Amino acid sequence: MSSMKKTMECVPNFSEGRDAKNIEKIVEPFREQKGVKLLDYQTDEDHNRMVVTVVGEAQALKTAVIAAMGCAIEVIDMNSHRGQHPRMGAIDVVPFIPIRN
């Protein structure tokens, strides 16, 4: 049993829900990272937000999340960002949920 890898789910929230090019840049690390599966991402133009659902082996997931956060910081200009949802930054929350082990 101890040889089984830890599997996690992550549901990061990004302050981008309008610009398709930026959205694709942010989700790309989840598509490219081996050991990670992009399950879904939903955007909301009114709130200018995106919620991503991704699962994977813990270390691979961590790598992909950090890469996606870097992309978000690079492409989202919080000085000009507008939306109905209160914003703390380019990335608001990054919850991790243990799935296995």
Image: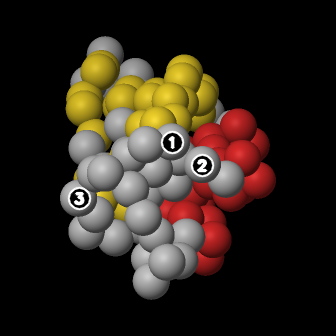
Q: Is residue 2 above or below residue 28?
A: above
Relative horizontal placement of residue 41, taking residue 82 as reference (left or right): right
Image location (x, y in percent) of residue 1 = 31, 16
- Residue in the picture at 51% in, 54% down: 16
101 vs 10, left or right, is left
Q: Which is nearer the eye, 84 or 91?
A: 84
Q: Distance between the residues labelled 3 and 2?
A: 16 Å
Q: What residue type is labelled 2?
A: Arg
Residue shown at the point (25%, 68%) measured from the top left: 88
Callout 2 crowding tier (Cα within 10 Å): few <14, some 14–19, many ≥20: some
- Residue 27 visible, this angle: yes
The answer to whether residue 34 is left or right of residue 61 is: right
The residue singled out by tag 2 in the image is 18
Around disc 3, counting alpha carbons within 10 Å, would you say few (fewer than 14), some (14 to 19), or many (20 or more)?
A: few
Q: Helix, strand, or loop for circle 3?
A: loop
Residue 2's x, y, as percent? 30, 25
The amino acid at mark 3 is: Pro
The circle on residue 45 is: 1
* Dot 2 or dot 1, earlier in sequence: 2
Which label was assigned to residue 88? none
Residue corresponding to mark 3 = 86
- Distance, label 3 to label 1, CA atoms, is 14 Å
Label 1 element class:
loop
Whether the residues at callouts 2 and 1 have beta carbons within 8 Å, the answer is yes
Do residues under tags 3 and 1 come within 8 Å of each other at their CB atoms?
Answer: no
